[in-house]
Image (cartoon, rainbow, N blue to C red):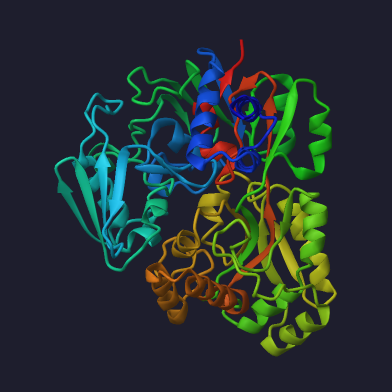
């Protein structure tokens, strides 16, 4: 059995078999989860990562207004920057479990209201300062303050107290929450010296690389952190992130060898990219979703009949067929799909219905056009998707005016500011984190301005509910509220579709975020 599992482990490491399939086959052979994970780790180690060289990533989702403050990260390039120079307390493994980072251990009280994180010793920041529990507390406090603009603020508001006990950071919650370790994996919560209070944009962390070039909207360059505490990452001597927002230019950069990997390969050209010599397509299903978002507190979208009209005017199946080309699945106007542990299929699938759309549009009393903003920087194929939506709306007498915005500045000037636009979410590991980040009334990243007291109370109740059947039902009821009353139109869940040169080793599928949960540059290497 061991020989067969070792062979499968090598297939995983070479990218020919995904981790989930490996675990299923291992279980069928009678191997325990612990044994399988250990064997998989041994297989990965046996691959002998090649050290040295310059590894380059071409990415969309970058602009001249991008900040290096991890609290403000809102698109792909800031995400990749964070994971290049920084570390979290814990992160999410390929199989969805918790991976220890700067917290080498954690545990909870019986009521799940008090959590203790043991901070790793001997870790050094890029500036030579030794990591302490005080740095961790200062970081969490900076992201928790009422004046904070952190994308993690929605999940951090559940924290009541932060204390230091020797090498431990003790987190006291206002209410019980069995998912707290998953919340600590939020990619904004990179641990900084003194919490980043001195200079949150300094890009000084404990990560595998030190930033040496910072040209927002153009490129970001790094060199290997010689004092990295983690022995099995940061294989290249240097890494570089090139901001290439245009899809065609990004693919051309991969084809010419200017970069070794690109995120967001448009599904409609996957077959063409697969024909490029020395290039492979990596596709990983996950929780990411492409969306059309309306501010429920802003005219004319404060009218729920208008929102329902637009929801019924959306041809979701057409979106999946013509925008995703099979690299994704149908959405249902909630941010949760079957990848989540407490997903419920009880919320009836909304279908394209021009008659219902016309009924609600007339009932809304709205006249004239409805303005929606878009950009290819919001998601691959967003402009085509907007035009498809425009056509399906016209069948119900709804005049949708599509305004194409510049790629640069889309995430600072359009998303979360304009009342109707296209966008995307990478999803989160748990329902609680997804809802707390973007749908809780007080969430700073509540990009639909959805505020519902009943929903908020249910979210708190779900956190402390130990009966899994009851907890699943609460989440189903919350989904119904968002489905019927929210400002989210979610027609589709996307796969992560990425192009990687065959010269790159160490690639493993990770469903949590793009580019191996943002860590492809630190975990991959250039083959000799």
Q: Residue at x 51, y 42 (%)?
A: 33
Q: Is residue 271 positioned above or below 323 on the image? A: above
Where residue 381 appears, x then y in whole percent?
74, 49
Where residue 501 appears, x then y in whole percent?
69, 23
Instruction: Give left or right: position of 269 versus 259.
Output: right
| Residue 168 figure quarter | top left
Q: Residue furthest top?
A: 528
| Residue 372 figure quarter | bottom right
Q: Is residue 74 positioned above or below 457 on the image? A: above
Q: Is residue 157 positioned above or below 279 on the image? A: below
Where residue 198 appears, x then y in whole percent?
24, 40
In this rendering, the count of numbered labels is 0
Q: Look at the image and tell me whether residue 64 can be seen.
A: no
Q: Quadrant of the C terminus?
A: top right
Q: Residue at x 28, y 28 (%)?
A: 125
Instruction: Give left or right: position of 133 versus 79.
Output: left
Q: Look at the image and tell me whether residue 505 can be seen.
A: yes
Q: Quadrant of the N terminus?
A: top right
The one nearer the camera, 158 or 413, is 158
Instruction: Give left or right: position of 455 versus 267.
Output: left
The one nearer the camera, 110 or 228, is 110
The one nearer the camera, 299 or 396, is 396
């Amino acid at each position: 059995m061991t020989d067969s599992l070792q062979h499968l482990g090598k297939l995983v490491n070479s990218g020919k078999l995904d981790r989930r399939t490996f675990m299923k086959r291992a279980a069928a052979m009678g191997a325990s989860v612990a044994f399988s994970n250990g064997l998989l780790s041994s297989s990965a180690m046996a691959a002998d990562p090649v050290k040295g060289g310059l590894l380059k990533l071409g990415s969309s989702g970058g602009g001249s207004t991008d900040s290096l403050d991890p609290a403000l990260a809102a698109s792909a390039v800031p995400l990749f920057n964070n994971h290049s120079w920084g570390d979290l307390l814990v992160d999410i493994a390929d199989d969805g479990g918790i991976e220890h980072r700067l917290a080498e251990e954690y545990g909870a009280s019986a009521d799940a209201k008090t959590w203790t994180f043991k901070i790793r010793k001997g870790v050094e920041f890029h500036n030579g300062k030794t990591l302490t529990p005080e740095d961790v507390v200062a970081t969490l406090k900076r992201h928790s303050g009422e004046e904070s603009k952190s994308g993690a603020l929605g999940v951090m508001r559940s924290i009541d107290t932060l204390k230091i006990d020797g090498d431990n950071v003790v987190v006291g919650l206002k209410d019980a929450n069995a998912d707290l370790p998953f919340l600590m994996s939020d990619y904004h919560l990179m641990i900084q010296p003194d919490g980043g209070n001195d200079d949150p944009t300094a890009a000084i962390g404990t990560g595998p690389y030190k930033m040496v070039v910072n040209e927002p909207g153009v490129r970001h360059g790094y060199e290997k952190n010689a004092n990295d505490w983690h022995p099995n990452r940061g294989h290249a001597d240097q890494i570089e992130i090139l901001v290439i927002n245009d899809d065609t230019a990004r693919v051309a950069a991969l084809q010419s060898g200017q970069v070794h990997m690109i995120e967001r390969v448009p599904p409609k050209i996957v077959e063409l990219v697969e024909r490029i010599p020395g290039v492979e397509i990596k596709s990983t299903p996950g929780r990411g979703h492409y969306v059309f978002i309306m501010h429920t507190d802003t005219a004319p979208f404060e009218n729920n009949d208008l929102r329902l009209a637009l929801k019924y005017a959306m041809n979701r199946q057409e979106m999946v067929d013509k925008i995703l080309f099979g690299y994704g699945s149908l959405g249902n106007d909630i941010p949760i799909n079957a990848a989540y542990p407490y997903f419920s299929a009880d919320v009836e699938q909304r279908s394209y219905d021009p008659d219902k759309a016309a009924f609600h549009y007339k009932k809304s009393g709205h006249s004239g056009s409805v303005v929606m903003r878009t950009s290819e920087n919001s998601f691959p194929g967003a402009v085509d998707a907007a035009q498809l939506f425009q056509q399906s709306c016209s069948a119900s007498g709804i005049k949708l005016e599509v305004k194409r915005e510049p790629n640069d500045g889309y995430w600072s000037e359009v998303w979360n500011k304009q009342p109707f636009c296209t966008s995307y979410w990478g999803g989160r590991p748990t329902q609680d984190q997804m809802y707390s980040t973007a749908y809780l009334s007080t969430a700073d990243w509540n990009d639909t301005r959805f505020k519902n007291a009943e929903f908020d109370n249910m979210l708190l109740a779900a956190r402390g509910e130990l009966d899994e059947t009851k907890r699943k039902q609460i989440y189903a009821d919350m989904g119904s509220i968002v489905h019927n009353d929210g400002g989210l139109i979610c027609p589709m869940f996307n796969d992560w579709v990425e192009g990687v040169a065959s010269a790159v080793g160490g690639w493993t599928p990770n469903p949590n975020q793009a580019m191996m949960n943002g860590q492809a540059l630190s975990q991959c290497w250039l083959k000799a």
